[in-house]
Amino acid sequence: MAPSQLAIVGAGPRGVGVLERLSANAAELLGPAGLVVHLIDPFPPGAGRIWRYEQSPLLRMNSMAEDVTMFTDDTVTMDGPVRTGPSLWQWAQEVRAGRIRYDVPEDLRDELAALRGTSFPTRRLASAYLDWVYRHVLAGLAPGIEVVEHRTRATRIDDTRVWLDGVDEPLDVDVVVLAVGHLDAEPGSGERELAEFADAHGLAYYPAGYTADVDYQHVTPGEPVLVRGFGLAFVDLMLLLTEGRGGRFEERSGGLVYRPSGAEPVLHIGSRRGVPYHAKPGYRLQGSALRLPRFFGPERVAELLARDRHLDFRADVWPHVAKELAWGYYSELFTGHPSRVLMSFEDFSRCFADFAWDSAEMRALVRRAVPAEEDRLDLERLDRPLAGLRFETAEEFGKHLRSYVEADLARRADPAYSADLGAFMALLSAYQQMPALTASGALNVSDVDGWWHGFFSYYASGPPPRRLHELLALHQAGVVSFLGADVSISLSPEGFVASSGSFPGSVTARTLIEARLPAPSVSRASDGLLAQLRGAGELAEEHVRDLPSGRISTRVSDGRLLDAAGRPQPRRFALGPHTSARSAAAFTRPRTNGPSFRQNDAAAREILRLVG
């Protein structure tokens, strides 16, 4: 009997994660004929495109080495067996000790030697870890599974045939998994308008894209450049256009100093909030283990869905999410820093549980128990720190923003404020509950994919602290200036004109860069394979309450691809952040019941049942 054939399109962390789960579940579910897995990706297996080694050594992960793993553990709620393995930090320790044999590239050896659990690794070192993970999975493949690599693109899927770029004959397969990661998209209507204006007036416009793949060589030294976006894409852009052009950061007694090379442009940065993402915390929890989820877990989600009506995110969901964040925050404050509160945690938690979020009773409880205002959690101020503030000049605003960033760095470095990490952990917990709500169709996904995802990224997915120190050094050197909040762009024959709600006046530049990833959009996906499947009605854009989300429509329980009529396709699956499952990342923190692990396991078990 011939073995079954499976095509996994995308051999990055998600594709390799599915392969690992296929191997883990094979003893229980794989039939005697066996399975051939075709891994299809023009980029190296394991790392894939985003984490490939061939990118700037300046670019780093925004996660600490101890917070990155590709292996399941006993916290993962799945039907398949656990197969443990090292986190990136544990792997580095084992390689250094010689217990894991891996030929680390020469230009990574100094970084590997200096790495700590709280270090933020370069993407190149992450690439090495992911390469080792892939090799480790291959070495431990279950009997009956064979892997064939195809270092090219899949261009078309017809029935059971997968056509590959540059290959005359298609692969004839039984099952297809799309593990395509983030969706590159053609510019939307607003971006097209800006691009057409730029073409007509000799200006330069860079639409949203993955920063490491965009060619910025035509951005000239000394020219003013408008940048929209203050998140992780901006951080990459900032480094590529400064240190990446020969500038140097130097440690001085007064802090970090930037020495320009003269090749840098002048970056004018603004966004909706007008501030950068919060730096990652540099400490661990000081108090008792957090009990999460507490107020926004599966039982609360089930209760919300049992209302059998359309839910409003702000009115129905956010109060429970906010209470969960506050629970994480105050749990750590009371147990980790008892000298700063005036009530026992037992008494506080009993009252806290009884009061509705942001009620007069809850506000009074917090004032009574937490005397220092800086120790109280203010989610509204946290979300919009510049709200209601207006400055007379750009210089005055710049001074304020410097103080804001300096305060954020100080707070994120001082374990006295570890309550912020309690809220951080509660936010991660709450994020894991959202897919069940969005999959139900009861919730407007624009709220979840828009404000909620943005708030999560801003608070919990910010850069390493070093990057904000570099931002301040660049500002001090005159290479960066701040535009403020609620930035708007108007058009003039002289260029793009940026103004904000933070101070009067405007900045005109002949170059505008969108420093963000494209929003997911099946209808505008630039990938030829996705466009072909959509055109054939075999891949559809998710609609929730009759509104398109831009994501690939899948069945959340097992990742099955839904066609244009909403029917599950029995032999096609799609997994990743831009599917209905909305997983935050391909890898996750150890011991946090990572959604990607659960999704990979469920899909792998369904695939093995199909192939018998």
Image: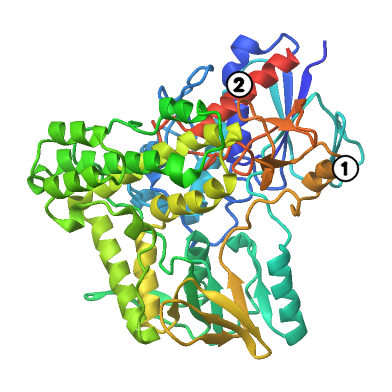
User: Which quarter of the figure is the C terminus placed in?
Assistant: top right
Q: Position of residue 579 (x, y in %)?
A: 64, 40
- Which sits earlier in the primary sequence, circle 2 or circle 1? 2
Which residue lies at the image location 74% right of the left edge and 16% below the top edge?
611
Helix, strand or loop at mark 2: helix
Q: Position of residue 114 (x, y in %)?
A: 34, 52
Q: Please determine whether, in this image, residue 374 is positioned above or below residue 239.
A: above
Which residue lies at the image location 61% right of the left edge and 39% below the top edge?
576
User: Which quarter of the figure is the N terminus placed in?
Assistant: top right
Q: Which of 247 and 206 lies nearest the eye of the viewer?
A: 206
Q: Please determine whether, in this image, residue 131 is positioned above or below residue 279.
A: above
Return the residue at label 2: 23
Q: Position of residue 169 (x, y in %)?
A: 91, 36
Does any portion of residue 569 appear in the rendered image? yes
Return the residue at label 1: 167
386 on left or right of 490: left
439 on left or right of 608: left
Q: Which of 373 and 139 lies nearest the eye of the viewer?
A: 373
40 on left or right of 14: right
Q: Please determine whether, in this image, residue 262 is positioned above or below residue 578.
A: below
- Neighbours of disc 1 within 10 Å: few (<14), some (14-19), many (20+): few
Query: Quadrant of residue 320 in the image?
Result: top left
Q: Position of residue 353 (x, y in %)?
A: 25, 33
Q: CA distance from mark 2 to mark 1?
A: 28 Å
Helix, strand or loop at mark 1: loop
Which residue lies at the image location 69% right of the left edge and 74% below the top edge?
194
558 on left or right of 236: right
Amino acid residing under circle 1: Val
Q: Which of 29 and 91 lies nearest the eye of the viewer?
A: 29
- Neighbours of disc 2 within 10 Å: few (<14), some (14-19), many (20+): many
Which residue lies at the image location 13% right of the left edge and 33% below the top edge?
347
Amino acid residing under circle 2: Ser
